[in-house]
Image: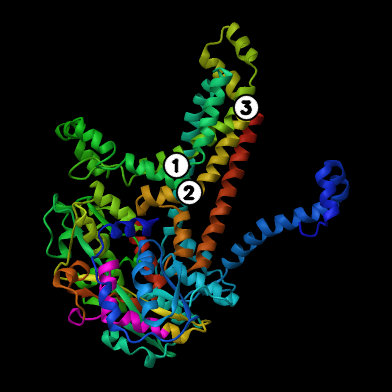
Amino acid sequence: MSAVDPPTLASSETSGRSRRSIMRPDLFQAVLWALILTLCVVPFVLVIVISFGQKIEGAAWAFGFTGANYQRFFVGASWPESTTFLYLNRLWYSVYYAVIAAVLAVLTAFPFTWFMTRMSRAAQSRWLVFLLATLSLSEVFIVMGWDILLSNRSGLPMVLRETGVTDWLKVTGWFDVLREWGMANPRNVKFKTSEFATILTMSYLVWPYAVILLYPALSRLDPSMTEAARTMGAGPWTVMRTVVLPSVRLPLIGTLFLLFVFLLGVYVSVTVFAEPAKQTLAVSVYEAVRGSTLNAPFGAAQAVILLITGGICLWLGQILVNRKGVTA
Amino acid sequence: MTKLNRRTLLKSTAGMGGLAAVGSVLGTPLIAQSRSLKVGSYGGYFENSFKEFVYPAFTEATGITIESVTQPNSADWLVTMQQASAAGSVPTDLSLYARDALIKSSRIGELVSPLDMTNIPAASNMEEDFLYEDSTGVIGVGAMAWFTSMVVNPDEVDTPASWVDFWDSSRFESSLGLSKLISGNLLDIIAATYFEGAGTFDTNEGILAMVEKAGELKPNVALWWTAESQMEQSMKNGDVVGGMYFHDVAQLMAADGFPIRSTFPKEGNPIGYGSWCLSALSEKADEAAEFINFSSDPATQALMSRKIGTAPLVAQSKTDLTDEEFSFVSGTPAIQPAYEAYLDNETFIKEAWDKMLASA
């Protein structure tokens, strides 16, 4: 911007038209490409380059060209003496949590948004403003809140104990079943750490996004279509299944994909609510890069694989959607 | 965030008095109007206490002003310093490194300078263990120590006399909070409790045996914590009734009325300590030496124990700490972590540990 001389600046302030004519399209293109290059391509390439770097045992790492980090991802560092699928396991949990939490969020957000679009304009705006406001809550804040809500002394376990549900569970024998599931200690039920808490928090985290993404499609839906279907004798479920859902199929699937990609990288919820045996690749990447081993190359390799996996999932999803689209 | 929690807590009850002792100990201030030094320390209450109590005493004694720099911790700071050194300008003259980060910086090379020990006579008050020497000379002098201690909720369970009790599922099923980080010293506790101490780390078989022993704890662990605030909250909430935690914070939580007891079982607790290290690009070697000399003085060590809650690196007899004050910050026996082995074999240990946690 410093290259712009004062007269140009002045004219651009006075008239948007003159500015357009001064800013030549090829210059604009060049600036755009420079931005894309520095903000997207360079960091990307750096990560890929680092992923081929060499770990120096006991120190940090150095640039290099080795496939050892990728090999380690699939079979472990001690291969061929011993093989471990530790990192594939982490990758599996990344995808697993992201899919379930995204589906749950869309499943619950869809009916909510549907009923919201049937409300008065004023009520709709109030809800939208409220939901937009909740987006300002960071992941850390949300996790903290759920952490308290699920805590033994201040949360749900306390409620269950005080209302006598815990005692009832103990009498009926369900308590021992919960202990086997890891959802209770000898004193009370517990929700941390558990898949339940992890998925719950992740769904909660993206829920407002789901509503905001579904809202435009649902609110634009022409009411005369559903009314026509109703007058022709279709029940509410049939209308939902044959009229509403097909017409918002694309936004619905788009939302699902977006939430899925967003959730692949979730870190705080997983570190706090998932037991170490069920943690994700995002946690593993962080531990490699910022943890005491200072193994950025291995972290980068894991990040690249996570990226590729996300891409493959989206691609498979796309194929599935297209095929359905043809048959429908 | 983490440090803030921990240190805010420390602040509420930390020590009483002690500043007076320092002024008298150190010699005449040097005439040095414009001398200054940039010193790093872990942010939050820890750094604030340094700014409030330690640095002013130093400035009063030597005339050298201190510019305090916030470090997030040792490991992250090492990454920062590595990048800063490559760029040719470092944010601190003196950094505070835990022992493992110190060794690591020595192995990476060209990050820290050897210290002129003739200018640091007070370091002789410390045990040799706290002076770290590599091929270039002494590159780290101990600053303060801390213990990772056995803690229990005395309202819920009896205090164990040995770490062995934590393996007893009839007492601790789904009830313990242990450090998930390999650097959290659980393996050192296991080495001291079930094996031949730090020597067990010398072979891969020894490491696997210890990791397997750690795996036997899993049914009893409700929380594998990475940030100390997680453990703090879980002890307060009753999500866990025991585990491992920092001795100093546990003492302060107990003083605040929370149901937590920090105890030294018969095998002891792992000790960790921070060292002052001079950045290779610093031009303030003389000022740094004066500061380290000041920090090594028994009076300053006692000041830090009272004000920050850290354990002194000099014998209690050399300080004016009372038995009560001393037991508030320290205890015996101390388990020495196998620092070198963790680094020599870090990929293997880390992966074995992660496999155990993931049951993969």
Q: Nearer the viewer, residue B356 or A216?
A: A216
- Are discs 2 and 1 less than 8 Å apart at CB? yes
Report the Cα–Cα distance between label 2 and label 3: 27 Å
What amino acid is labelled 1 in the image?
A: Met
Identify the chain of the residue marked 2, using the numbered disc in the image.
A
Identify the chain of the residue marked 1, using the numbered disc in the image.
A
Residue B345 visible in this rendered orientation of the protein = no
Label number found at residue A217: 3
Report the Cα–Cα distance between label 2 and label 1: 8 Å
At x 20%, y 59%, the residue is B151
Q: For mark 2, does the 10 Å Cα neighbourhood hold few (<14), some (14 to 19), or many (20 or more) residues?
A: many
Report whether A265 appears left or right of B262.
right
Query: Where in the figure is residue B122, as x and y percent of width and height?
Result: 31, 87
Report helix, strand or loop for mark 1.
Answer: helix
Report whether A5 appears left or right of B155.
right
In terms of sequence position, does the residue under pointer 2 or pointer 3 come before the other? 3
In terms of sequence position, does the residue under pointer 1 or pointer 3 come before the other? 1
Q: Say if the magenta span includes residue A302.
A: no
Residue marked by disc 2: A266
Q: Say if the magenta span includes residue B296.
A: yes
Report helix, strand or loop for mark 3.
Answer: helix
Label number found at residue A278: none
Query: Are dots 1 and 3 on a single chain?
Result: yes
Occupied quadrant, residue B26: bottom left
Residue marked by disc 1: A202
- Are discs 2 and 3 less than 8 Å apart at CB? no
Q: Which residues are magenta?
A: B289-318
* Quarter of the image with the C terminus of chain A in it: top right
Query: Where in the figure is residue B199, as x and y percent of width and height?
Result: 26, 79
What amino acid is labelled 2 in the image?
A: Val
At x 40%, y 39%, the residue is A200
